[in-house]
Amino acid sequence: MGTGTEIGRVRGLGSAKAGAHHWWIQRLTAGSNLLLMLWFLFSLLRLPHYDHATIVAWLSTPFAAVAMILLVLSVFWHFRLGLQVVIEDYQHDESRVVAIILLNFYTFAMAGFAIFAILKIAFTGGAV
């Protein structure tokens, strides 16, 4: 295998040797999203009622709370990886760095809010 053209080497074009890890992590999060979403769907379908008290009681169990936190982490991580690729592919100026920073702040903030809500229900039973 060659090292590419001379102009490509000068411009820094070509593989950065870091895309395989990103690709692999995105596939792993996709698989975990599938499994956790199936668990979530079947867990909801097994509930006798869908009123507030039943959902809070279900989410107050340790298994449901931990699985929901894992689902939130997996979904938001997958979301961030996917949008990072879109930004890197279609933003070509300095605003790309700002867009990725804003994406990271948004993703971590929303995941944090979701995890806080799950923990609040799990530890207090939804009491204010």
Image (cartoon, rainbow, N blue to C red):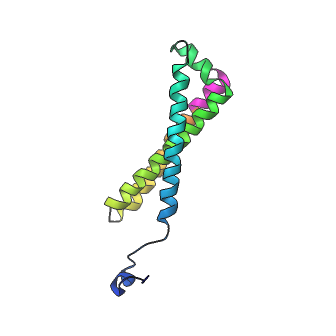
Measured along the vertical axis of the image, is residue 2 above or below residue 94?
below
From the viewer's perspective, tell me whether residue 81 is left or right of residue 128. Answer: left
User: Percent from the top left, x then y, of residue 10?
Assistant: 38, 84
- Splitting the image into 4 quarters, where does residue 122 fall? top right
Eyeballing the image, is 38 above or below 86? above
Identify which residue is drawn at 49% across, 70% down. 17
Looking at the image, the residue that sits furthest to the bottom is: 6
For the residue pair 31 and 88, the one nearer the viewer reads as 31
Question: Where 84 sits versus 68, above or below?
Answer: below
Q: Which residues are magenta?
A: 117-128
Indicate the position of residue 32 as horizontal and vertical percent values. 54, 42
Q: Is residue 96 left or right of residue 106?
A: left
Q: Is residue 128 or residue 89 the one in the foreground? A: 89
Tell which of 69 and 43 is nearer to you: 43
For image coordinates 53% across by 25% down, the residue present is: 42
Q: Is residue 50 left or right of residue 12?
A: right
| Percent of width and height locating residue 101 | 45, 55
- Quadrant where the N terminus sits is bottom left
For the point 40% across and 57% down, which residue is it? 85
The overriding secondary structure of the stretch rendered in magenta is helix
Quadrant location of the C terminus in the rendered image: top right
Is residue 61 one of those drawn in magenta? Answer: no
Residue 62, percent from left and from top? 68, 28
Question: Which residue is depicted at the point 40% across and 78% down?
Answer: 12
The reply to whether residue 108 is in sight is no
